[in-house]
Image: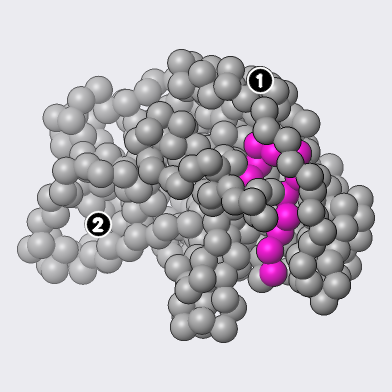
Amino acid sequence: MIERTLPGISPGEIIVRNLYTTLCGSDLHTFCGLRQEKTPTVLGHEIVGEVVEIGEGHSGLDYAGNPLGPGDIVTWCIFSSDPQSDEARRRMPQKASALFKYGHAQVTEHDAFHGGLAEYCILKENTAILRIPEGVPLDVAATINCAVATVAGALRLAGDVRGRRVLITGLGLLGIVCAAMCRDQGAGRIFTADINADRLRHSLDFGADETFLLASAESAHCTECSPHDIDIAFDMSGAPDAMELGTWALRVGGTAVWIGAVFHARPVQVDAEQVVRKLLTLKGLHNYNYEDFAFAVDFIGRCHSLFPFDQIVGKEFVLPDAQAAFEYALKYKPLRVGIRF
């Protein structure tokens, strides 16, 4: 455990006392050495906290224009970036210049409070922040600014899902949130596919209509055990076999949205002739933008009690036991492990 003195804040910044952090898959990848970050660092970016102090020059408003004050329970975008950059103007602020990502930055002598596995977080200027709707549990609220917001971005790219046949491959937290969000937005029929039977069963509680167990790579291409005539195929797994299945299953005019491919894998094989003849669209998304973040907060505010989001966190730990939390997450692979302060 490292102790640092909480510094004074610069103009436009906000001090937040962290209340709850969930361990994301990227945290586990960094912990295991599969993802490289500059060290030392403070991991944890799925965070919810309480406003302690608002710096001079800050508007005193959240992203929705609501007044902010000490004691407010909030979440914030996992990034801070230049709102006037070309990328931000093109609705991609998560790829803008001078990007700063919470839970992924190096600890320095003057900048240490920027991750969820610390008691406080200092929110930098140009960080979108939103108050948590009343009644949302902390463990659910913590997932908003990563998993839920990313899924909101996926639905934005997919377009109107009302009445559509939807396939979701990969039933981790992204996948089950996608099922719930598609159900909330009026999808016609929702299919889920995964190699994990327990997670497939869980997806039924989050709005899925029918599940497909993919026991092997070969089964992902079996026309008798896979859905077809799909309008929108979301991949949350990053597995090439799953992305190929989703593309194969699309009907004429269908759209594939890929979210999970954030690690090295073999190249995906796509039949270019089918893309052309079936008028298919392939889209990818990394992280999310501000409108996705706002949609995610609204969605959880409306729907956290309509689906069993209270089952997302498999086990809770306290900050001094963070090492045990990572070890538990890696051994038992729950959707999320929580750190309560």
| Mark 2, other Cα within 10 Å: few <14 / some 14–19 / many ≥20 | some
Magenta residues, dominant SS class: loop
Q: Nearer the viewer, residue 87 or 138?
A: 87
* Lateral position of residue 212 relative to residue 248, left or right: right
Number of callouts in the render? Answer: 2
Q: Residue at x 35, y 48 (%)?
A: 262
- Report x, y in % for residue 123: 71, 59
The type of residue carrying mark 1 is Asp
* Residue 256 visible in the displayed image: yes
Q: From which residue to which does the magenta span run?
A: 114-125
Q: In this view, does 291 lie to the left or right of 271?
A: right
Residue 47 location (% of width, % of height): 67, 44
Q: Considering only vertical position in the picture, is 167 above or below 9?
A: above
Q: In which quarter of the image is residue 63?
A: bottom right
Residue 321 numbered tag: 1
**Residue receiving disc 2:** 251
Q: In this view, does 21 lie above or below 62?
A: above
